[in-house]
Image: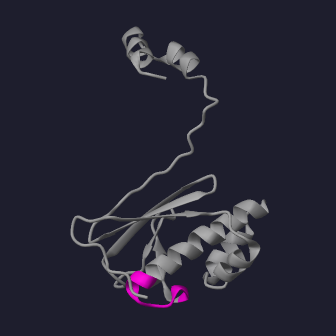
Amino acid sequence: MKLKKPRKNEVHLWKANLDQPSARVDNLLRILSREERERADRFHLERDRNRFVVGRGLLRKILGRYLVIDAAAVRFEYNATEKPFLASGSSDLRFNLSHSQGLVVYALALGRDVGVDVERVRSDIDWEGISGRYFSASENKALRSFPE
């Protein structure tokens, strides 16, 4: 099924759980490129390997649906920091992704770079200790004025 590409000034967001059953991981592994499978094999922990496979496999599935091609046919190039982008001439569709723990978020836009970030919120941070050490008195006062 084809997905409508984002319109000008529109961003499409997708989120997914990276922790999937082994049958789903195996299915997604089949659509990865040889280089992606080799990269997955370099992870020491099975959980991290599986999360990489799911994250990249779902990216391929999403892009394939927008581009109306098989997910395995999606071709990437990489910048100097190894960030993937669609191979030259493939499309003016741009994407970005972020993952934290078992969550991945994808952002897609047409003809412009796009960014997305997701982070796990931790409740065990000693924010008062950190703020007391690194923030000014006025910053600490402002921080403590917020409801818990």
Magenta-highlighted stretch: main secondary structure?
A: helix
* Relative image position of residue 65 (x, y in whole percent): 44, 84
Q: Quadrant of residue 45?
A: bottom right
* Relative image position of residue 64 (x, y in whole percent): 46, 84
User: Which residue is at a point 37% across and 11% down the rendered structure image?
Assistant: 138
- In the picture, which quadrant includes the N terminus? bottom left
- Residue 93 vertical placement versus 146 (above, below): below
Instruction: Single out the residue that lies furthest toward the left.
Output: 8
Specify whether 87 is left or right of 103: left
Between 34 and 68, the one nearer to me in the picture: 68
Specify whether 92 is left or right of 32: left
User: Which residue is at a point 58% across and 16% down the rendered structure image?
Assistant: 129
Between 126 and 93, the one nearer to me in the picture: 126
Instruction: Single out the residue that lies furthest toward the top.
Output: 137
- Residue 113 vertical placement versus 88 (above, below): above
User: Which residue is at a point 53% across and 46% down the rendered structure image?
Assistant: 119
Q: Quadrant of residue 20?
A: bottom right
Q: Is residue 37 magenta?
A: no
Q: Quadrant of residue 120?
A: top right
User: Which residue is at a point 50% across and 18% down the rendered structure image?
Assistant: 131
Between 77 and 31, the one nearer to me in the picture: 31
* Relative image position of residue 21 (x, y in whole percent): 73, 71
Specify whether 128 is left or right of 4: right
- Residue 122 vertical placement versus 44 (above, below): above
Which stretch did the figure color magenta? 65-72
